Amino acid sequence: MSSYHGKVDSLGLSFFGSMTASISHEIKNSLAIINENAGLLGDLVALSEKGRPLDPERMKTIADSIRRRVQNADDIVRRLNRFAHSANQPVVSAGIRDILACTIVLSERLATMKGVSLALADGDEIEVQTLPFVIENLLWICLKNIFLLAETGQQVVLDARREASDIVVTLRCTPEIPVKQLESSVAAEGQPLIFFLRVQAQADPDGSSLHLRMPIRFIE
């Protein structure tokens, strides 16, 4: 088991690095737009010093743009903070749909770059005893491999349901992708996580979904 702990930690470090890099790019983009708007304000002030009257509506538009970007950057930092703290969490009680939603938010940038849309199906929350960071890591591996198989315009819907003492997380792809190939790729790359969480990963016979079945209560 200790060797699996090491492999889980290694995958977790890689996952943490990928997500941190992605989130830092989002922050950088917001800062670039704020800087651009600040430069525009400076240009308008310089023109006003030469006698050109300031346009209040234009100033308001620029100020609103800066305010939105500051709010966006604040949301990103909050997301990063939550994600960073989850890496050190022990087994906790958490909502599986909340975990899925967090994974979607973390993965949206790469999904957008690949032309893939992510969504969370409607449904009631289900409380689980688990390690959210490790589940997010496994879901990220699933999504990353879906992106490799997907075409532009692909939609991936994440869902969860309870079956007896298990939780079944489903990633449904529209249009269909070769999910048997996806199952093999996820099993190969995520094998330490699958073993650690006691997950059964199985492609749907109809060729559109990958199911991850795991105990509702994680016991190490």
Image (spheres, rainbow, N blue to C red):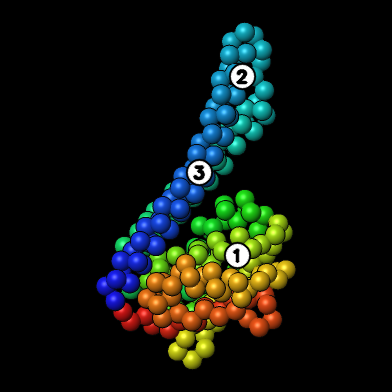
Indicate the secondary structure of the residue bearing disc 3.
Answer: helix
Earlier sequence position, callout 1 versus callout 3: 3
Q: Is residue 110 above or below residue 207?
A: above
Query: In the drawing, what numbered circle is on residue 113?
Result: none
Q: CA distance from mark 1 to mark 3?
A: 22 Å
Q: CA distance from mark 3 to mark 2?
A: 29 Å
Indicate the secondary structure of the residue bearing disc 1.
Answer: helix
Q: Quadrant of the C terminus?
A: bottom left
Query: In the drawing, what numbered circle is on residue 146?
Result: 1
Residue 13 in the image: state x and y as whole percent: 37, 57
Earlier sequence position, callout 3 versus callout 2: 3
Mark 2 residue type: Leu
Residue 30 in the image: state x and y as whole percent: 53, 39
Residue on which the image places disc 2: 44
Residue 52 in the image: state x and y as whole percent: 66, 12
Mark 3 residue type: His
Residue at 67%, 64% (x, y): give it.
Answer: 155
Residue at 43%, 84% (x, y): give it.
Answer: 215
Q: CA distance from mark 2 to mark 1?
A: 47 Å
Q: Residues within 10 Å of mark 3 (few under 14, many from 20)?
A: few
* Front residue of this view, candidates 60 and 113: 113
Q: Residue furthest left?
A: 2
Residue on which the image places disc 3: 25
